[in-house]
Amino acid sequence: MSERPRLTVLSGPSGVGKSTVVAHMRKEHPEVWLSVSATTRRPRPGEKHGVHYFFVTDEEMDKLIANGELLEWAEFAGNRYGTPRAAVLERLEAGEPVLLEIDLQGARQVRESMADAQLVFLAPPSWEELVRRLTGRGTEAPEVIERRLDAAKVELAAEPEFDLTLVNTSVEDVARELLALVDVV
Ligand SMILES: Nc1ncnc2c1ncn2[C@@H]1O[C@H](COP(=O)(O)OP(=O)(O)OP(=O)(O)O)[C@@H](O)[C@H]1O
Ligand SMILES: Nc1nc2c(ncn2[C@@H]2O[C@H](COP(=O)(O)O)[C@@H](O)[C@H]2O)c(=O)[nH]1
């Protein structure tokens, strides 16, 4: 029986490359189960309901929170995001590894409720590169980018709270390192 943690949280500033790294890893290893979050954010072009997120209204999010259906949730840059509790617990109870891609506030909540969770911080090679990636993605308006960069300063300062840090210089290298951390047989 492996002693590696079953639940892994991947966190890090907006634009650092979390989704890119996870998508790369799952292309080669689709057996890695990633929780699909609920969010009040509008879908970006190409994003599908139930695949990238469960896109919900403010009222639906209120209900998910009030009914205790979220393992954790947070407001990030003007939208709310949360991890559906039932699907995660189902996987863990079946002994299967779980990966969450969430912000710092969510990572802290998971740390509180699941002491044996493994918290991984994804860091950019430099601040300038983070700005370049977030801006270059072209998915947010300039004022939203500003809000996300403000949040990034707070997130970068919280790096010591995490169990380990991976620096996203190469997507391939980080995807390989992350795969080794996620307890996939
Ligand atoms: N190692 C890398 N080198 C260069 N560009 C990268 C690298 N990793 C990711 N990118 C690019 O950076 C941009 C942001 O990546 P991505 O959307 O995966 O970030 P994220 O951390 O998931 O952001 P968010 O938290 O806002 O969802 C994308 O355009 C992606 O192609
Ligand atoms: N606390 C949570 N944070 C989440 C969740 N799902 C995603 N996120 C994080 O939100 C920001 C913004 O995401 P974006 O898709 O709008 O760019 C990013 O840091 C995500 O990791 C969640 O369920 N809970």
Image (tube, grey):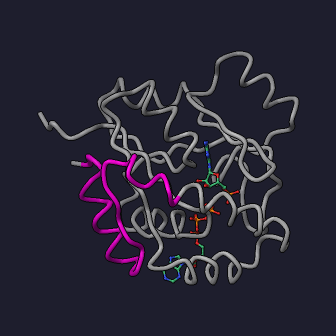
Q: Is residue 144 left or right of residue 23?
A: right
The span picked out in magenta is 156-184
**In the rendered structure, does residue 81 fall within the stretch colored magenta?**
no
Q: Return the residue nearer the eye: 42 or 130.
A: 130
Q: Residue at 79% across / 68% down in the picture?
A: 45
**In the rendered structure, does residue 174 fall within the stretch colored magenta?**
yes
In this view, 109 is above or below 49: above
Q: Return the residue nearer the eye: 155 or 135.
A: 155
Q: Residue furthest top?
A: 67
| Numbered marks: total | 0
Q: Residue furthest left?
A: 1
In the rendered image, which quarter contains the N terminus? top left
Q: Residue at 52% across / 32% down in the picture?
A: 109
Percent position (x, y) of residue 184?
26, 49
Percent position (x, y) of residue 144?
81, 65
Q: Is residue 50 left or right of residue 94?
A: right
Q: Residue at 21% across / 48% down in the picture?
A: 185
Q: Is residue 162 left or right of residue 56?
A: left
In this view, 162 is above or below 128: above
